Image (cartoon, rainbow, N blue to C red):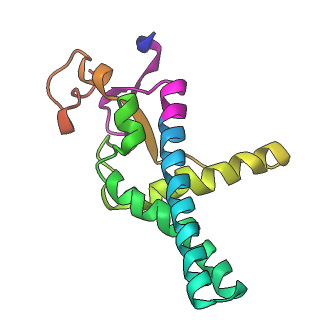
Amino acid sequence: MATDRVKAFGNGTRYVEAGGWARFFAWLIDAVIVLFGLLVGTGALAAADNALQIGGGAIAVGMLVLLFAVPLLYGLCYTNGRALGALATGTRLVRVRDGGRIGAKGPWAMVVRTVLLPLLIIAVFVGGTVDGSFVRTSIDVARTRGLPAGSGVDGLPARTP
């Protein structure tokens, strides 16, 4: 039920946190799109190597660049907090501080979601720990708009009383 997922941003504005499955499927869709971009980039590197005989070192650097460039480019679609994964699941990534859009940090957020998050999960399973706090969260857009209250920032309900 959505009522147990009602939370408040740092400024007191209430929102409905996106469910675990919605977050997972949003991430999965974004990860598949980034993987597709990596495969296309790898094919382009292979074709360039075949035509120009670039060499192994340059190909390795190219692969490393692709690993970060593809999510950064896809993240340009994410500045309003709604890449294809979020659109498909009805969620939006917003700032925990005030519920605002993530803006220019969208490309970095996509790198974190698709490259660094899987590495973090692997590290935790291998035996590491995770400290810190979140600066962004996913909200359920439709349920957040349905919360009873006056108008708030960015179409979100006003602060809790």
Q: Residue furthest left?
A: 151
On the question of residue 3 being in view, the answer is yes
150 up-or-down from 121: above or below: above
Where's the C terminus, which quadrant? top left
x and y, in percent, of residue 150 in the image: 15, 22
Range drawn in magenta: 4-25
x and y, in percent, of residue 137 in the image: 45, 39
On the question of residue 9 being in view, the answer is no
Q: Residue at x 22, y 15 (%)?
A: 148
**Closest to the observer, 4 or 159:** 4
**Closest to the observer, 36 or 134:** 36
Q: Residue at x 62, y 73 (%)?
A: 64
Q: Residue furthest right?
A: 127
5 up-or-down from 109: above or below: above
Relative to 152, 140 lies left or right: right
**Closest to the observer, 108 or 42:** 42
35 up-or-down from 158: above or below: below
Q: Is residue 112 magenta?
A: no
x and y, in percent, of residue 28 in the image: 54, 39
Q: Residue at x 38, y 39 (%)?
A: 10
Relative to 146, 58 lies left or right: right
Q: Residue furthest top?
A: 1
x and y, in percent, of residue 115 in the image: 60, 56
75 up-or-down from 8: above or below: below
Relative to 33, 8 lies left or right: left
Figure quadrant of residue 139: top left
Q: Residue at x 32, y 32 (%)?
A: 12
